[in-house]
Image (spheres, rainbow, N blue to C red):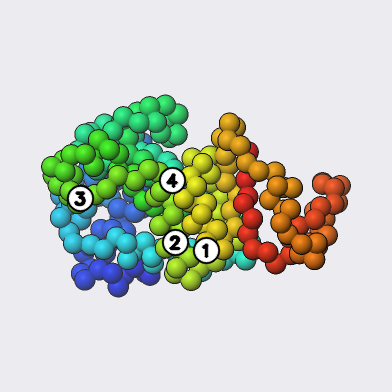
């Protein structure tokens, strides 16, 4: 938490945010302002609620601090970025973005919030570095509901794969490096995301749904002259020898 200390004007909120984070990381069966305040030894949840609901803060600045910390401490030249969605089951109706929707957390349709998360993954360790909350049409079509929850009433709807592109862009624009971007078929089925990665020269391995038709290697490679290719071999006996384009930039990468 010392890295974030400069983001707080006073000592009290700095100490309280530390207790809040530790509470969220604890094994409490339910983690909210009431349970965490009690766990932290506070008489009431007022301080925690004040910190989250009314205190002025710049969460995105802290997010950037966290991203820098993760890359610095988990640095790996072979690191990849993994984008995936996850949900938090929520029993209320006023939490921003909540609705009945599928969440992998429960493995079924539940009243929940869903967000895209970006994970920096090295060969041995990994950690989340960014997030983007999914705001369903049931919210974006109701400006008054957005306003009441503190959300910009002009918020436009964006599908989950569309949220991934700006999350990835923030990481790369900050000067961080990743060898690949990986994701499941939710993201592999979105041509805009693939195009964005190709335009940035960023390799990717994205799953695609079974019915999707993609061109085979021969169809992709026929325009390349012979001099553009070089021989390559993977691990012994794992695969037969293959030929890959030398210096021709990223090709479409698919995994199923």
246 or 63, which is in the foreground? 246
Mark 2 in CB contact with mark 4 (< 8 angstroms)? no
Q: Residue at x 49, y 40 (%)?
A: 186
Is the residue 8 above or below the residue 182 in the image?
below
Instruction: Point out the image quarter for the C terminus.
Output: top right
Q: Residues within 10 Å of mark 3 (few under 14, many from 20)?
A: few
Mark 1 highlights which residue? 200
Asked which secondary structure carries label 1, the reply is loop
Residue 32 percent coordinates (x, y): 27, 42
User: Mark 1 and mark 2 in contact (Cβ < 8 Å)?
Assistant: yes
Marks 1 and 3, Cα distance to the nearest angstrom? 29 Å
Residue at disc 3, secondary structure: loop
Where residue 163 appears, as percent x and y from the top left, is 39, 50
Tell me which residue sits at (57%, 39%) in the image: 208
Q: Which residue is mark 2?
A: 169
Distance between the alpha carbons at the discs numbered 2 and 3: 23 Å
Label 2 crowd (10 A; few <14 / some 14-19 / many >=20) = few
**Any part of residue 199 in sight:** yes
Say which of 170 and 119 sits in front. Answer: 170
In front here: 39 or 66? 66
Tell me: residue 101, above or below residue 81. Answer: above
């Amino acid at each position: 938490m010392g890295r974030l200390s400069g983001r707080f004007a006073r000592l009290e909120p700095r100490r309280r945010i530390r207790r809040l984070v530790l509470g969220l990381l604890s094994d409490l069966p339910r983690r909210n302002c009431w349970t965490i305040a009690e766990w932290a030894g506070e008489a009431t949840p007022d301080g925690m609620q004040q910190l989250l609901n009314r205190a002025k803060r710049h969460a995105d600045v802290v997010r950037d601090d966290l991203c820098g910390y993760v890359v610095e401490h988990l640095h790996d030249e072979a690191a990849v970025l993994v984008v995936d969605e996850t949900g938090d089951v929520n029993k209320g109706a006023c939490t921003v973005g909540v609705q009945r929707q599928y969440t992998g957390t429960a493995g079924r349709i539940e009243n929940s919030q869903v967000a895209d998360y970006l994970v920096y993954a090295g060969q041995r360790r990994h950690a989340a570095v960014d997030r983007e909350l999914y705001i369903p049409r049931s919210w974006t079509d109701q400006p008054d509901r957005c306003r009441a929850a503190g959300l910009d009433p002009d918020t436009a709807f964006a599908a989950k794969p569309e949220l991934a592109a700006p999350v990835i862009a923030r990481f790369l624009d900050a000067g961080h490096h990743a060898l690949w971007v990986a994701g499941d078929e939710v993201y592999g089925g979105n041509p805009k995301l693939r195009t964005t990665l190709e335009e940035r020269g960023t390799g990717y391995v994205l799953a695609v749904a079974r019915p999707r038709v993609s061109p085979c290697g021969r169809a992709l490679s026929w325009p390349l002259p012979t001099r553009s290719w070089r021989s390559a071999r993977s691990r012994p006996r794992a695969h037969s020898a293959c030929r890959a384009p030398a210096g021709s930039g990223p090709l479409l990468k698919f995994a199923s």
